[in-house]
Amino acid sequence: MLAYAKEAIRLLSDPGKITVGFRWRLLLYFFLFSGVILSVMFFSLIAMEIFSPRKAADTLFEQRAKQNKHYLEKYFSDTAAQGIHFSRQLSQTIANVLEEKDASFDDVSDNYDLIKLLQSRVYSLVYDYFLIADCSGAFFSLDATIKSNTSNAEPLKTAIFL
């Protein structure tokens, strides 16, 4: 193919000596016409951004952003619903223990046995929700302490954290 192109260029550069046949001229014009058409098509596609890698990357990033947004919305919605359900179950368990012991919430502070009973009953609930929820921890905290009447007592809370 390269030999034909060199021959065509040599023949076209010195037209007086050798007469170019009709077949050679037709072949040369066909290749030139094809090259021009392909170049025009290629540059038009580039101008219309059909072969643009930026457009493909933008489309890919938009799709991933939509997927991530949907995943995060579902994750936070599920986590919030589980947190609400967890707090209701926790409140019900604490209320049941206080009703069982015929005590009020004010009686919890400075009552070691009641605090220990609350923690032991709530532990399994906290553990179960920790396993159910897609999170890194679960906890509950009571505004109660065993030594609130000492002189250097800080405001302490009793808690379980998993």
Image (tube, rainbow, N blue to C red):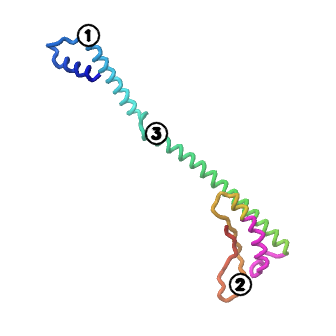
Q: Is residue 82 above or below residue 23?
A: below
| Residue 17 in picture, x, y percent from top left | 14, 13
Q: Quadrant of residue 44?
A: top left
| Residue 147: assigned label | 2
- Asked if marks 1 and 3 touch (Cβ < 8 Å), the reply is no
Amino acid type at image mark 3 = Ala
The residue lying at 72 percent from left, 77 percent from top is 144
Q: CA distance from mark 2 to mark 3?
A: 66 Å
Magenta segment = 102-126
**Pointer 3: what residue?**
56
Dots 2, 3 in contact, CB < 8 A: no
Label 3 Cα crowd, 10 Å radius (few <14 / some 14-19 / many 20+): few
Who is closer to the viewer here, 113 or 79? Answer: 113
Q: Earlier in the sequence, mark 2 or mark 3?
A: 3
Q: Residues within 10 Å of mark 2 (few under 14, many from 20)?
A: some
**Cα distance in 3D space between marks 1 and 2:** 112 Å
Give the residue number, with chain letter if any, for mark 1: 22
Q: Position of residue 162 (x, y in %)?
A: 67, 67
**Mark nearer the viewer, 1 or 3:** 1
Observer-side mark, 1 or 2, equals 1
Q: Position of residue 3 (x, y in %)?
A: 25, 21
Considering the image in quadrants, where does the N terminus appear?
top left
**For numbered disc 1, what is the local secondary structure?**
helix
Secondary structure, mark 3, is helix
Pick the residue in front: 49 or 42. Answer: 42
**Observer-nearest of 84 and 32:** 32
Name the amino acid type tagged 2: Lys
